[in-house]
Amino acid sequence: MIDTIIFDFGNVIVDYNADYIVRCFADKDEDIKLLCDAVNHNWSALDEGIIEYDEYINQTKAMLPERLYDNVDRLFVDWYKCMPYIDGVKEIIKSLKQNGYKLIILSNAPDYFADVIDYFDVVQNFDAIVISGKIKMFKPNKDIYEYVLKKYDLTDENTLFIDDKTENVNSAKSCNINGLVFNQDAEKLKTDLKELFGINL
């Protein structure tokens, strides 16, 4: 019986769209293209915690004309504010919490995201938040799932992991964790939770 549900954050709880985020901080198509290429040049290094935030900002600026430096500074402070909730998921999370499930966020994100994630009021429903850059582990590597199981004293077969990426879900399954790929359809998620795992909302 499932007693714990682990949620990815970007593209499961909120809509993470790198191009849309950049458009929040630039107007001209040329600038948007330059910023997209520079900001995303090695973002996974931030998520893995193998590069410091300030160093990454400096690398990004080095790829851009000076007139865009202010855009970069503003983007790296406020990028997460440009991620709207995915319709219906917040309500599912609240219902799961009310029904007594332990809820955990497991997200590939820069370490500093752990300090600002409270911007999203949905996180008050979660018992724990694990940010990849903070612990220097990264989905889909198996060690991050093993870390969560051990740290929070979870039983693998009683745990469900929800992510938008098939490779992340498959890796969790290789650790005997139940897995579900989410396609930004909250109604389908409700159906899958009930029909596949007996979870009623």
Image (spheres, rainbow, N blue to C red):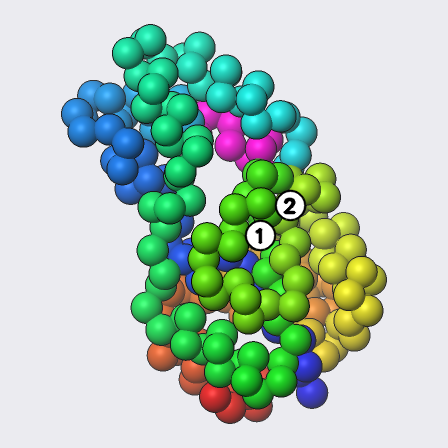
Is any part of residue 192 visible from this angle? no
**Residue stretch in magenta:** 40-47
Q: Which three-letter amino acid code belongs to the residue tagged 2?
A: Ser
| Magenta stretch prevailing secondary structure | helix
Q: Label 1, label 2: how many angstroms apart (C-alpha)? A: 6 Å
Q: Is residue 115 left or right of residue 192?
A: right
| Residue drawn 33% across the image and 8% down it | 66
Q: In the structure shown, which secondary structural element does the residue marked by tag 2 occupy? A: helix
Toward the viewer: 177 or 20? 20
Toward the viewer: 176 or 131? 131
Asked if the residues shown at circle 1 and circle 2 are in contact, with their CB atoms under 8 angstroms apart, the answer is: yes
Q: What percent of the width, then of the height, locates residue 139?
A: 63, 49
Is 18 situated above or below 101?
Answer: above
**Splitting the image into 4 quarters, where does residue 49 fall?**
top right
Q: Which residue is mark 2?
A: 132
Q: Which residue is mark 1?
A: 107
Question: Farthest residue toward the left?
Answer: 28
Q: What percent of the width, then of the height, locates residue 150?
A: 82, 62
Is 38 situated above or below 170?
Answer: above
Q: Which three-letter amino acid code belongs to the residue tagged 1?
A: Ser
| Residue drawn 17% across the image and 25% down it | 28
Is any part of residue 70 visible from this angle? yes
| Residue drawn 58% across the image and 39% down it | 112
Q: In the structure shown, which secondary structural element does the residue marked by tag 1 occupy? A: strand
Q: What percent of the width, then of the height, locates residue 198?
A: 57, 90
Magenta stretch: includes residue 22: no
Label 1 neighbourhood size at 10 Å, few (<14), some (14-19), many (20+)? many
Image quadrant occupied by the N terminus: bottom right
